[in-house]
Image (cartoon, rainbow, N blue to C red):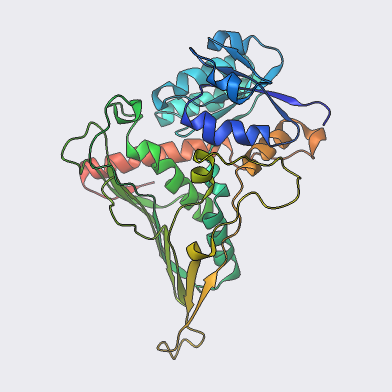
Amino acid sequence: MAEEIGVGIIGFGLAAKVFHAPFVSAVPGLRLVAFVERKGDEAHKAYPATRTVRTVDELLADAEIEVVVVATPNPTHYSLAKQALEAGKHVVIDKPFAGTSAEAAELIALAETNGVLVAPFHNRRWDGDFLTVKKILADGSLGRLVTFESHFDRYRPIQREGTWKEAGDPANGLLMDLGPHLVDQAVALFGMPQTITASVRTDRDKTDIEDAFDICLGYEGLLAWCRSSMLACDASPRFLLHGTAGSFKKYGLDPQEPALVAGAKVPRMGEPGEWLAEDEAMWGTLTVAPVLVDPGTLVQEQVQTICGDYRGFYANVRDAIRPRMGGKAELAVPSAAGFAVVRLLELARVSSREGRTVGV
C-alpha cells in the first residue's frame, strides 16, 4: 500500500512482543521500522526487516517513523510519550495511559499543540468476549440490565522478585495493570459513571503492590463491577450480566494473548480466514425467561463468541492518521478515554482510602 506509515516501538518486553509488534506487522499500510532495545538483538531476530537502536533519541530522530509505540514499564509511560510528542510523532501508549490524570491531561494538550494523535492502547475493546457482550446488550436479550460484573483474575500468591510489575510504584500494581482494561470496557459500554465505590487493597501475605480491587461504578439503575485478584485459585466468570429478562455468563479470557505467547503468528489483515476463533467449550451461556410472568420456565443456550482481533486497533490508528488509506476516521479509543480511565482509577483509590462512595 502506498504511503506506508512507519512505526517504531520503544521496548521489546512482553507488551511489544505479544500485543504490539505482531499486530502492527499484520496491518496493511503500517510498516514496522525499528525497536528501541537497549541491549541484545532479540527484536531484530524476531523481525529481520527492522532496525534496532539503543536510545529513544535515535528512534525519534528517524524521519521514517511517524508513530511511536510506548511499550515500556508503567512508570516510564508519561515521560517517553511526552518526549515523542515533543518530537512531533503520533504516539500509542500501552496501558496505563499515564500515572496520573494530570499527566494524562498534559499529554493530550501537548498532542493537540503539535497536531499529532496520542492514543491509549485499550486493546481489550477488541476482545471476542467483550464484543459478544456488546452484541447481547444491543439486541436486548437481557431486557433492562441491572448488574454487570467483569473479572480479570490471576493466581500469584507469592510476590515475584526482580520484576518491575511488583515494585512499589503508584503506577504499578494490579489496579494500574488490569484495572485499565476492566474500567475502560465498562465506560465503553455505559459511559462515565455517576459514582464510584471501591476497595483497593493488598491481600497477599507479602506484597509491595496493590494486588486486589473491587470497583463499583454507579449508573442510573445499573451497577457495574470491575474486579481483580491475585489470589483467585478458582476462576470466577469473566462476565456475569443480569437483566430484567435474563442473564449471561461467560468464563475464560480472550484466546489471543495465550496463543501469541505460545508462538502463534498473526495473519496479515485481508488474508482469508479468521484470526482466532474461541473454542466452543468456552462460549458463554445466555439464560432468559421468554414469558416474564412465568419465571420458572427458562430457556438456556450457548452463545458463540465473536472472534476478537487486536489488528482492529492499529487499523483504526492507521485510518485516523492517513485519510487516503481508508477514509478519515476518528480514533476508536480517543485520548479522552485514556484520561477518563486514569481519573476513575484515582477516584477508586480515594474511595478505598476514605471508605466512602465518591461522586464522579
Nearer to me, 155 or 193: 155
Residue placed at 46% from the left, 52% from the top?
253
Q: Is residue 155 left or right of residue 189?
A: left
- Give the answer, above or below, for where 48 lies relative to 192: above
Q: Is residue 36 left or right of residue 234?
A: right
Q: Is residue 332 left or right of residue 56?
A: right
In the rendering, at what x and y percent does residue 242 appear? 42, 69
Nearer to me, 88 or 282: 282
In the rendering, at what x and y percent does residue 40 appear? 50, 14
Quadrant of residue 25 within the rendered picture = top right
Nearer to me, 48 or 284: 48
In the rendering, at what x and y percent does residue 141 appear? 54, 73
In which quadrant is the N terminus drawn?
Answer: top right
Residue placed at 30% from the left, 57% from the top?
234
Quadrant of residue 23 within the rendered picture = top right
Is residue 119 in view from this perspective?
A: no
Is residue 290 in view from this perspective?
A: yes
- Give the answer, above or below, for where 128 lies relative to 147: above
In the rendering, at what x and y percent does residue 233 appear? 28, 52
Residue placed at 63% from the left, 24% from the top?
47
Residue lying furthest bottom: 294
Residue placed at 40% from the left, 28% from the top?
99
Tally of marks: 0
Nearer to me, 339 or 177: 177
